Amino acid sequence: MSAIPPLRALIVDDEELARHLIREYLQGHADIEIVGECENGLDAVRQIGALTPDLVFLDIQMPRLTGLEVLELTGRRAGVIFTTAYDEHAIKAFELHAVDYLLKPFSKARFDDALARARALHAPASPAPALDALIARKTAPLERILIRDREQVHVIAIDQVECIEAQGDYLAIHADGKCHLKPQRISEIEEQLDSTRFLRVHRSFIISLAHLQAIERPGPDRHAARLRSGKRVPISRSGYEKLRTLV
Amino acid sequence: MHPILADARKLLWYVLAWLLAGIGIAALLRLTEQAEWSGALWFALPICLVWSFVALSSYYVCRSLPYSQRRWPVALGLFGGASLLSALAWLGLGEAWDSMGRLVSHDKPFVAMTSPGWVMYFAAGFVLYLLSLLAHDVLVAFESVQAAARREAESRVLARDAELQMLRTQINPHFLFNSLNSISALTGFDPAAAREMTVDLAQFFRRTLALAERERITLGEEVVLCEHFLAIEKRRFGAKLKTELRIAANATDCLLPPMTLQPLLENAIKHGIRQVDGGGTITVDALVRDGWLHIAVVNPVAADEVPASGHGVGLKNIRERLAVLYGARARIAWQRSETQFAIEINLPADKEVIE
C-alpha cells in the first residue's frame, strides 16, 4: 500500500468556537492535516500564500476581508469549502454556480459529505471555473477595491478613487494622490462599478463623477476632464456624449 | 398642470366637442333666421375654438372650492358668478369677431343678429361655461378619489415595511445561526457552557418578542435584554469582547422604545470589536440629568477599516424611529475618530405613572 500524503488544510473563521468545531470534525479523518488557522481575511491572504494548503475552510463574513475577497486576492480557485451562517447574496451565487458550501450549524454527516466531494475534486488538479464567475460577479456595485502589493494588501474605499486608467494588462487606480496597480481589465471593473458614480469617458479611462471639476476643450473637437486633484483625463467623442447626458 | 392640457388625446377630443357645440350654435342661428349657414359657421366655429381654451379655466375655479369645505350658497354664487362673467366676455368676443367680418366678407358682418339673437347667444355662453364647470367638477372629484386610493396604498406599504424591519431586528438570522453553531461546537467539549448559552439565547428571544409588542419599556428591562445578548456574544468572541455597563440607579426606571440600546451594542460589536485585532471594551453610560435621559455607547474601531457595504443604515433607522415617537424632543448624535466610535442618545426622562 503506497502512502498517500495527507491533505493540508487551513481553517479560516473569526470565531474560535467555529474553528474548534471544524477541528473536532476533522479528528476522524486521518488523511487530513491542519496546517494553520486564521481569524481574519488579511491573515488568510498571507497564510494561503505562505502555506499553499490543499484545502481551505473559508468563512464568508469576516473582519477586514470577506471570504470572496480573500479568493480574489490570492487567485485561489480550487480546494475551498465555504462556511457561512447566513448571507443571502453569497448563497444565491453558490447555488447559481454549483459551488459547495456549509451552512452553520452543520452536522458531521454534511461535513463529511463536503469533504468527500473536495477530495474527489482534488485528485485531478483542475481549477473550478465556477469560482471565477462567482468572484467576478461579486455583490455589485463595488464599495471597495482590493490591491495586493507583494505582502501588503491595500483596501481602497470607492469614494477615494478619482480615476482608473488601463495600462496594458493592468489598471492604474488613482486615489488619494497615490497610484495603485492591479491586474484586471477595464471593462471588467466598469461592470462592477456603480454607473451613477463612475463613467467610462475613454477607451482607457474611467472617472469618478464626484471628482470631476470641469470639462475643458483643449482643441476643436477634443475634450478633457479636469479632476479636483488637477489631473487631466482625455475624453473620447462617445465619452463626451455620455458625459453630456449626465452632467 | 391642467389634466386636459397635459394629454394630447384628451385635448383633441375636448376641442372636437367644442367645435360640435359651435356647429350647434350655428344651427340655432340658422333656425331662428338670424344668419345664413356660411355666415353662422364663420361666426360660431372660431369663437368656440378660442372659448374651448378659455373654458379650461373652470378647472381652477373648481379646485379653489374643495368638496370638504363646500357650502351650497357659496358654490352656487361662485359658479353662477363665474359663468356670468365669462358669458359677458363671450358676448364681447362675439361682437368683436362679428365686426371683423366686415374686413373679410364684402363689408358686412358674419351675422346680422337682432337683440333677441344676442340674448340667445349670451345665454348659450352662460350655459356652456356652467356645463364646463360641472364637467370639471366631476373630473376633480375623480382625481381626488384616485389620489386618496394611491395615498392609502402607499401608507399600507410603509406600515408593512416598518413591521418587517421590526421583525428583522428581533431575529437577526446571522446572529441566530452563528450562535447555534457556537452551541454545536460547545456540546463537544463543554456541555455546561452549551446549556448556559442555549438558555441565554432562549431568554434573549423570549424577552425580545415580549418587549417588542409594547410601545415603551423601562431602561432596566432593556438592560436585562442586553445582558443576555452580551453573554451570547462573549461566548462567540471570547476575550475579544469586554463590556462595562454603568447604569445610574435613577435611570433604570426611565421609559424608552424597546430595542433602542440593543442595536447600538450589536453595531458596536459588528463594526467595532470584530474589526479590531485583539478586540476591546464597549462602555455604556446611562444617567438622568435635568429631566433628560442620556445614553452613551463608546467602542473601539479599526483605524484603517473600509466598510464592505452599507454603513450607517442601522443608525438612520434608529434615528427615524425616535423621530416618529418623540419628534424634535429626541436627539441622537454619533462621532467617529481614528480609534473609537461614540454615539449618544438623549430622550426626555419619562417615568411610568403608577396609579
Image (tube, rainbow, N blue to C red):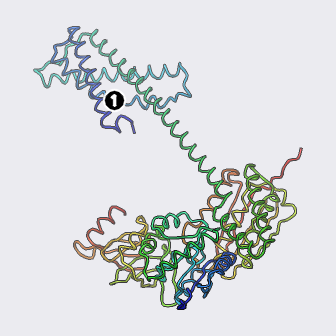
Q: Quadrant of the C terminus of chain B?
A: top right
Residue at x-position 44% and y-position 26%: B138
Return the chain for callout 1: B
Residue A231 in the image: above or below residue A2: above
Side of B187 relative to B162 (left or right)? right
Q: Which residue is mark 1?
A: B54
Position in image of residue B10 (x %, y %) = 32, 33
At label 1, counting other C-alpha atoms closer than 10 Å, the crowd grade (few under 14, some 14-19, many 20 or more) is few
The image quadrant of residue A246 is: bottom left
Residue at the outermost front position: A1
The image quadrant of residue B26 is: top left
As shown in the figure, which amino acid type bears the numbered disc 1? Answer: Val
Side of B163 relative to B83 (left or right)? right
Residue A176 visible in image: no
Side of B146 relative to B303 (left or right)? left
The image quadrant of residue A1 is: bottom right
